[in-house]
Image (spheres, rainbow, N blue to C red):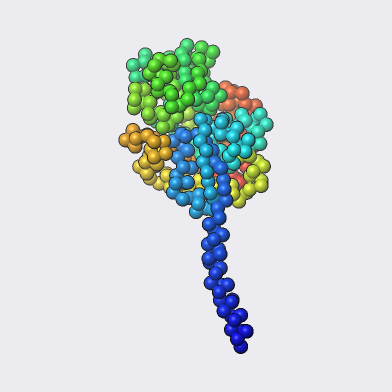
Amino acid sequence: MNKRRSTLIALALSVALLPVLASGQELKKIPLKVGGPRSAAFTNAWSAQQRGIFAKNGLDVSIVYFNNGGDAISAMQGGSVDVAETIPGFAMSAIGRGFDMAVIMQDEISYAKGPDSCSVEVSENSPIKTIADLRGKRVGVGAAGSQSAIALRMILDKAGVDLKTVSFNEVPFPAMLGALKAGHIDAVVAINPFTTQISKQGGRVISWCYVEAIPDMPVGAWFSKGSFIKANPHTVAAFVKSMKESDDWLNADADRARAEVAAFTKLDVALLKDMPIIRWNYHVKLSKWQEVVDMLVKYGSLDPHKAETYFSPMMKDDITP
């Protein structure tokens, strides 16, 4: 009788301990290194970390910041980060050079018409009024081969400007306002929050670069190495789930989104009160991606491709024609 009672007590204790053990297992998060530039668009990753979204989905995320998406891609290839956010043009060029990577989630698209995140701006007292006036001028760009710089080439060509007459100068986004005011360059191609900062502090927008090249242009995406995706499908899926939750949370409240951008970028929220909200969007329109590919082929150095060759299989439910 005593033996039976002891057995029952042991079973009861085992059952009682199961939730505790399960809770302990849940506390063990999967480490994941995430990289990208400190632009307004990257706020969704910062928010996912700050608001506990990553942790809720079982991830222990550490974030590494880079000057641009190209640097993030290089770091990912070297193993410093596991996933990286960048503008698709950078990644497509890297894949063309043999980098092992694929899109795991679309992150951002431009608006269909301005205002938008990406602008071409001049000093407020500049005689330059239109894109056509950039003939013979010096333009500051984040990187000469960036998607925004290539989009500018496209709209310059549409305006009848000989591209050989325009000088493209690489200027870090935070330095663009100073370079413009000092007269080192005649115009800049900026993205938010720098677009808004420049226009509020002595700049004037003459073009919405992405919008005028390709409305609803895909301008941000999350990439990972093909080998990492294959070896860690559940980790990548948890990351994508987290980012979608963060996007939905930010998109639900414009004021909250601006406050998050201000907290992340360390800019005054009053400065950003009129900033167009970053258009975080994970629903892929294949035809728009193909337009980007075609633009990069014509005005950049990309070889012709079908856009879907850049996508990982896990994206299939997010893609429409």
Please tell me how many numbered marks the rendered image carries.
0
Left or right position of 182 against 95: left
Residue in view at x 51 percent, y 36 percent? 65
Give the vertical position of 198 relative to 237 (above or below): above
What percent of the width, then of the height, locates residue 285? 54, 39
Give the vertical position of 258 relative to 124 (above or below): below
Give the vertical position of 56 relative to 11 (above or below): above
Residue in view at x 50 percent, y 14 percent? 166
Q: Nearer the viewer, residue 286 or 261?
A: 261
What percent of the width, then of the height, locates residue 277? 40, 37
What percent of the width, then of the height, locates residue 26? 54, 58
Q: Nearer the viewer, residue 47 or 266?
A: 266
Q: Residue furthest bottom?
A: 1
| Screen quadrant of the N terminus | bottom right
Q: Is residue 233 visible?
A: yes
Q: Is residue 134 visible?
A: no
Q: Residue furthest left?
A: 270
Residue in view at x 53 percent, y 57 percent? 27
| Among the 4 quarters of the image, the one containing residue 271 | top left
What percent of the width, then of the height, locates residue 49? 47, 46
